[in-house]
Image (spheres, grey):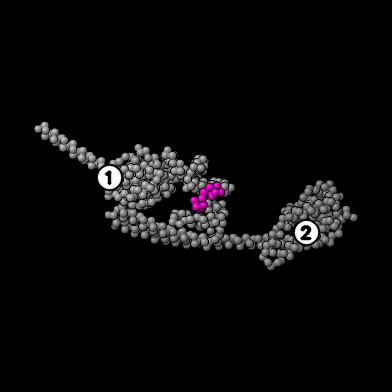
Amino acid sequence: MNKLLDMKRLLFILVFAATFEACERHSEHWATITEMESIIEERPDSVLNVLQSIDTDELIGDEERAKHAVLLSMALDKNVIDKTSFEVLQPAIDYYEDNGSATDKLRTYYYQARIYQNADNNAAAMECFVKAISEGSQSDDTLTKARTHFAQSNIYYDLYDFDNFIATNKSAAAYFKQAEDYNGYADCYNRIINGYTLKDEPEKALPYIDECKQMLDGLSIPTLTDFYSSYITYLINYGTEQEIDEIIHQFTNSIPSSNVDWLTIANAYYAMHRYNEALSVLSQYDTEGNEYKEKKYLVILYEVYKGLGDYKNTLETFEEYVDLFTNNILVKMQQDTKFVEERHALEMAKAKETEAKNRLTIIVLSCIVALLISLYILNHIRKQLKRSRVENAQLLSEKALYEQMYNEVVAERDALNEMITNNAIKEEAMEIIKKRLGVLNTIIVSHLSAKDTDIKRANEELEHLIANRNDFIKSTRLTLEENYPHFFAYLHDKGLEEFEIDFCCLYAIGLKGKEIKAYTNLTRHYKDSSEVRQKLGLTESDTNLSNFLQKLLKKEGE
């Protein structure tokens, strides 16, 4: 009996051992797969080639297939090969849901989320990112943790949730720093700068700008490009034109031309209203193969043409943007449909219904876009008409002003011609009057020209002449004061103020009251004249002020 029990126990041990050995047995590829895991961060291109060369039919066990699947997904992602189906990752999804380490779960959920992101399913992607953070909390894979938070921030950015956008980038930055990945660390800081700029909190962005400046020498070209782009965007809102020019110069001289973000530089020139420079920079911007870049390019180009007043190209650029926007909707709809078909083959009916709704949405959006274009054109025409009416009214006002000025000049010329016959004025004062008369005659002749350019020049001379009437008053006074000192001594003795003596000089050389009023621009002319008469001791029955002053001047000249 005991022998029988011993035989059964031995048989059980042998069967268990055989089963355990079968479970632990791996294919000849297992050593290669584990080796690829250790170098995937440094040599992702080589790892991709090796993993793709392995025949998955030769792999043994779910664990081996899961490990190969997750590493191959990592390699594809690091080589910027975006997948929108779960064909490669599915073995890892199935196995690590209930098995594997915290690192295995972290990576699997992260790359599952990346596939959802590539398929524009941000809701499902965010759910996987949250699971990756939760299930991988005990993992020591700090780089994948950093990338998880970094990828989350993209979704928050698309949702305009800038608070969470900043928070997730701060979390990612901490992990990148822990992993000594300073390019990733600086990338997060660049995005934090953008976040605070978008939130209009420039003071919070400054520490991150200063931190990045300390790291410039050790950063990669793409990270440097992102920093300068973020910094220029910040300066567009809060810096000076000189600061922007300095950073643009530093940017373009420290980065190869092919890596320079010409769009951001063009946007800076546009913000400074330097439209021709913006247009020149845009010609260097390559949008080929990148729809997002092309949309940004068209938006800036539209604003630049608008700033230049080139409305033909403005409208053509707007129409090009609308075409691209509509095509993008169609492409995204097709990608979404393909993703749903691959992931949910049994839901074709629902997918077709969704497609029909999307088509209806496109029709509605197309109608809205067409309406917006029409409204834009109508609004532009309305603004042009309004501007035209304002310009016409301004022209009429300017015409009336220049006619008034011209009439004043003609009246002044006639008055000065009469003065030339006044023998009481010495030759020096007469020379000033003749010189003034010569300028007046030149302007009057120019104003009578039929040429628009001559009229414009004459109007400018009119403005200058009338504006400088004070010079004529001063030169007249200085000449009289030099030649008739007793005349001025008499006026000072009578207690006349300086401005009263000025228009006494104009009376003395023969100007009439209305001309003097135009020269001195005194609204109180008549009141002031009355006060001068009183100071000079003239009553209402005495001679007028002009005759009195001319006789006084003539008396000294004899």
Q: Quadrant of the C terminus?
A: bottom right
Q: Earlier in the sequence, mark 1 or mark 2?
A: 1
The secondary structure type at the circle numbered 1 is loop
Residue that numbered label 1 is attached to: 27
Marker disc for residue 436: 2
Task: Give the camera-side residue of 181 and 506.
Answer: 181
Indicate the position of residue 115 as horizontal and vertical percent values: 36, 49
Residue 172: which quarter of the image? top left
Q: Position of residue 139 (x, y in %)?
A: 35, 38
Using residue 249 as the reference point, say whether residue 124 is left or right of it. left
Residue 209 in sight in this render: no
Q: Residue at x 50, y 55 (%)?
A: 285
- Where are the magenta residues, as a range? 248-264
Q: Is residue 254 visible?
A: yes
Decide if residue 479 is on the left or right side of residue 60.
right
The stretch drawn in magenta includes residue 195: no
Amino acid at pointer 1: Ser
- In this view, the residue in front, 124 or 87, is 87
| Residue 482 percent location from the top left of the image | 84, 51
- Secondary structure that dominates the magenta span: helix
